[in-house]
Image (spheres, rainbow, N blue to C red):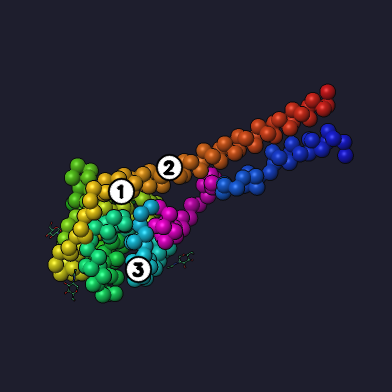
């Protein structure tokens, strides 16, 4: 084969290769499926990747409640699930003994209290506030009130209220919202649990770190998109250069 045809073949091959074969970053699925099947969400993966929800995931796993959540998320004929995920700092704020004292059943109720048996986008929350108390997966063992003070949403349980800090994930069937506090129903905690001693002046940076994590999670998708765009553009450029060399060889 002449060098010219080799160069042409290389150039053609390079342009024709699927992008995924040239780049280690997984190609984002850009083309929407014609009949969009509900997106499968692995909740354990989501919670471990999305940010500071390690303690919550730990308790969900230990009590098997993660399976209850996951089967609601999986059930495409069902109503979905809305999960209130307390950040690690919310667990750390409660006296360790108060949590360690709970029986397995009480822990399970506490975890079930952190979800509603239906998918609620953020836009549904003012209606939920008006309809409060709202049932949780713990049924009569835990109802919570949603409050909406000029758009500032809180979830109120017997022993305090937690701010809905951010939306971690929301797509029909599954919504996950971050809470800055634990929901504490009186059925699980007969008396108000003691709070952990607040460590000296450290918590402020921790709060910023949590915010930064949300931001990072929120921008990941954009980051992935733009880098794949760059890879695509780079590929076209290289292919173009090979074609130019080929053109020069022809002259
Ligand atoms: C949810 O669906 C996934 C994927 O189909 C499956 O692997 C998993 O076992 C299901 N989990 C539950 C709790 O139904
Ligand atoms: C833990 O349980 C013990 C005995 O059941 C009780 O005396 C103690 O007050 C409990 N501690 C907390 C923090 O709830
Ligand atoms: C929720 O609101 C109702 C009435 O609006 C009130 O009776 C109930 O105590 C509240 N529940 C909690 C957990 O704050």
Is ligand 2 within 8 Å of the beta carbon of the residue shown at mark 1? no
Q: Is residue 10 left or right of residue 66?
A: right
- Secondary structure, magenta segment, majority class: loop
Q: Is mark 2 within 8 Å of ligand 1?
A: no
Number of callouts in the render?
3
Q: Secondary structure at mark 3?
A: helix
Residue at figure coordinates x 57%, y 47% from the top left: 25
Quadrant (top left, top right, bottom left, bottom right) of the C terminus: top right
Q: Residues within 10 Å of mark 3 (few under 14, many from 20)?
A: some
Describe residue 120's horizontal placement relative to residue 196 as left or right.
right
Q: Which mark is residue 206?
A: 1
Answer with mark 1 or mark 2, whichever residue precedes in sequence: 1
- Give SS at disc 1: helix
For disc 3, the marked residue is 65
What residue does disc 2 label?
219
Q: Which mark is nearer the camera, 1 or 2?
A: 1
Q: Gap between marks 3 and 2, in whole Å?
A: 29 Å
Comes first in the chain, label 3 or label 2: 3
Q: CA distance from mark 1 to mark 2?
A: 20 Å
The residue furthest right is 1
Q: Position of residue 201 (x, y in %)?
A: 23, 48
Residue 98, x across and y down, in percent: 21, 67
Query: Could you say which is closer to the camera, residue 71 or residue 43?
Result: 43
First to last magenta residue range: 28-50
């Amino acid at each position: 084969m002449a060098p010219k045809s080799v160069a042409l073949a290389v150039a053609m091959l390079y342009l024709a290769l699927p992008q995924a074969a040239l780049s280690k970053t997984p190609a984002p699925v850009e083309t929407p499926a014609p009949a969009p099947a509900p997106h499968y969400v692995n909740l354990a993966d989501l919670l471990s990747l999305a940010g500071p929800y390690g303690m919550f995931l730990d308790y969900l796993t230990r009590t098997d409640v993660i399976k209850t959540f996951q089967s609601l998320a999986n059930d495409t004929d069902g109503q979905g699930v809305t999960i209130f995920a307390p950040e690690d700092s919310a667990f750390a704020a409660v006296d360790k003994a108060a949590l360690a004292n709970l029986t397995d059943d009480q822990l399970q109720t506490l975890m079930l209290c952190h979800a509603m048996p239906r998918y609620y986008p953020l836009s549904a929350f003012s209606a939920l506030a008006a309809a409060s108390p709202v049932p949780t997966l713990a049924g009569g063992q835990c109802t919570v009130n949603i409050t909406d003070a000029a758009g500032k949403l809180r979830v109120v349980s017997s022993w305090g209220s937690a701010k809905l800090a951010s939306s971690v994930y929301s797509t029909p069937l599954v919504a996950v919202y971050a809470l800055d506090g634990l929901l504490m129903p009186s059925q699980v905690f007969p008396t108000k649990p003691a709070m952990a001693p607040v460590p000296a002046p450290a918590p402020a940076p921790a709060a910023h770190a949590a915010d930064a994590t949300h931001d990072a999670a929120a921008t990941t998708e954009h980051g992935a998109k733009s880098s794949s765009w760059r890879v695509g553009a780079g590929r076209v450029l290289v292919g173009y250069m090979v074609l130019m060399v080929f053109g020069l060889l022809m002259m």
